[in-house]
Amino acid sequence: MSKQYETVFILTPILSEAQTRDAVEKFRAIITDNGGAMVHEEDWGLRKLAYPIQKKNSGFYNVFEYTTSEVNVVDILETEFRRDERVLRFMTIVLDKHSIAYNEKKRKGLVGRKREVSTETKTENA
C-alpha cells in the first residue's frame, strides 16, 4: 500500500545557489532511486528562523511531497539528512486523506485567498 509523505528541510544559509540546488537534487534522487515518486516540490527560499540553530538565524526552506510503498525510503532519506552538514533541520510527516486534499487545493490556489466582496453588498450595507 502506497503512502504519501511530506518532508520539510532547512539548509544552512551560507550555501550558494548552486550548492543549494545540488543538495536539493541529491535528496530528490534519494527518493526517486529508492522507489518513491515525487508529487510536488516547493522551494520557499531564504527565510528567518523562529530561533537560532547552530548560531544561524536564517535558512533555505524546501518541501518535498512524495509517495512510496517502500517504508525504508523515509529512513534512508532521514539518515542522509543527519549525515549531511548542510541540513539544519528536517521533518517528515505521513499525509492522511484530508491533508492530501488540502495540499491539492493549495496548489490550485483555492486556499489562502480572501473572498472578494461584491460592490453590491457594500452599497446595500452603507
Image (cartoon, rainbow, N blue to C red):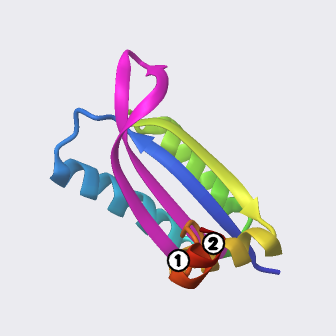
Q: Secondary structure at mark 2?
A: helix
Numbered tag placed on residue 107 in the rendering: 1
Q: Give the residue at x 71% y 55%.
A: 93
20 sits left or right of 10 in the view: left
**Type of amino acid at the residue the image marks with label 2:** Asn
Q: Give the residue at x 69% y 72%.
A: 102
Q: Quadrant of the N terminus?
A: bottom right
Pinpoint residue 78: horizontal percent, then vertical percent.
Answer: 59, 47
Q: Is residue 41 magenta?
A: yes
- Callout 1 touching callout 2 (CB < 8 Å): yes
Pinpoint residue 5: horizontal percent, then vertical percent.
Answer: 67, 65
Q: Secondary structure at mark 1?
A: helix
Where residue 57 sits, quadrant-wise, is top left
Residues at marks 1 and 2, CA–CA distance in whole angstroms? 6 Å
123 sits left or right of 60 in the view: right
Q: Which residues are magenta?
A: 40-67
Numbered tag placed on residue 103 in the rendering: 2
Q: Report the front residue among 106 and 93.
A: 106
Pinpoint residue 39: horizontal percent, then vertical percent.
Answer: 55, 78
Vertical arrangement, residue 67 with respect to residue 5, above or below = below
Q: Give the residue at x 51% y 80%.
A: 119
Task: Look at the magenta stretch and give its main secondary structure.
Answer: strand
Q: Is residue 66 magenta?
A: yes
Asked if residue 119 shows in the view, the reply is yes
- How many tags in the picture? 2
Q: Report the front residue among 9 and 45.
A: 45
Q: Quadrant of the C terminus?
A: bottom right
